[in-house]
Amino acid sequence: MIEDTARALVAGRGVPVPGDDIDTDRIIPARYMKSISFEELGAFAFHDERFDGKGGPRPHPFNDPRFAGASILLVNRNFGCGSSREHAPQSLTRWGIRALVGESFAEIFSGNCTAMGIPAVRVAHGDVQRLMELVEEDPAVELVIDLKAKEVRVGPGGSSGKSFPFEMPAGDRQSLVSGDWDTTAVLLANLEAIRSTAARLPYVGGFPA
């Protein structure tokens, strides 16, 4: 039995990080990409915007105690542009982000998010502004991203009646809903079929174990 990896419904509190064209260098500076694993990258998310040259904190949503424990990142246009580094979404998810809602995302960044099981959904400019306002007014409010209904709802279980439609690539949405985004889990679930197919291929056999 493999883990259920579907991401059809994601709920949590939001943290707004406004601004267009926030690139991967701002999400995580290149000097923090030297580690051989992603485990410690959460501490460096938005590092140069969160701290000054002496390590003192700057005003930033990720430093704001009102948004401590938030798991849904609200952003504007072309978020994640710049380099294709996987470290950017890795640092965000290690900080605690489980989904993103924004006007638009750089294509490679969005693809990296999907490959990690993180929905990155696109809403209209006015809708993301309204969502940011609602979270600023009440940082404890719950947001619900429903991938099947293709909407972001507000309130416990989406109960407030406020909802915002979103778009995302059909293939990304389907892979998250079905759990097929986790390619390792898909391979493990079909291990016997893979072995059977490999056994029939003449160019696969004859190698030492």
Image: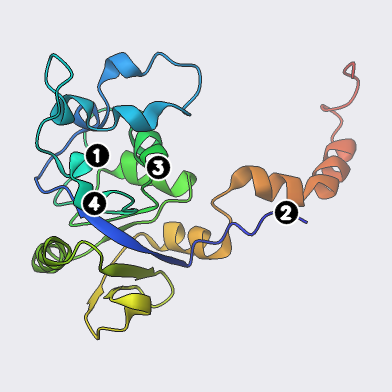
Marks 2 and 3, the one that precedes in the sequence = 2
Mark toward the start of the polypeptide (1 vs 3): 1
Query: Label 3: which residue?
Result: 93
Q: Please say if the residues under marks 4 and 1 sit with CB atoms less than 8 Å apart.
A: no
Query: Between tags 4 and 2, which lies in front?
Result: 4
Crowding around mark 3 (Cα neighbors within 10 Å: few <14, some 14 to 19, many 20+) is: many
- Separation of residues labelled 4 and 2 (CA atoms): 33 Å
Residue at the location (36% across, 39% down)? Answer: 95
Residue 168: quadrant of the picture = bottom left
Mark 2 vs 1, N-terminal side: 2
Mark toward the start of the polypeptide (4 vs 3) = 4
Whether residue 103 is visible to the viewer of this picture, yes or no, is: yes
Separation of disc 4 and disc 3 at Cα?
15 Å
Label 1 amino acid? Gly
Name the residue tied to disc 2: 2
Residue type, mark 4 in image: Phe
- Name the residue tied to disc 1: 80
Q: Earlier in the sequence, mark 4 or mark 1?
A: 4
The answer to whether mark 1 and mark 3 are in CB contact below 8 A is no
Q: Is residue 29 above or below residue 113?
A: above
Residue lying at 43% horizontally and 26% vertically, measured from the top left: 40
Task: Judge from the rendering whether residue 23 lies leftward or rightward of residue 37; answer left or right.
Answer: left
Q: Which residue is mark 4?
A: 67
Above or below, 142 against 83 in this view is: below
Q: Nearer the viewer, mark 4 or mark 1?
A: 4
Q: Alpha-carbon neighbours of circle 1 within 10 Å: few (<14), some, or many (≥20)? A: many
Measure how far apart labels 4 and 1 are at the Cα level: 21 Å
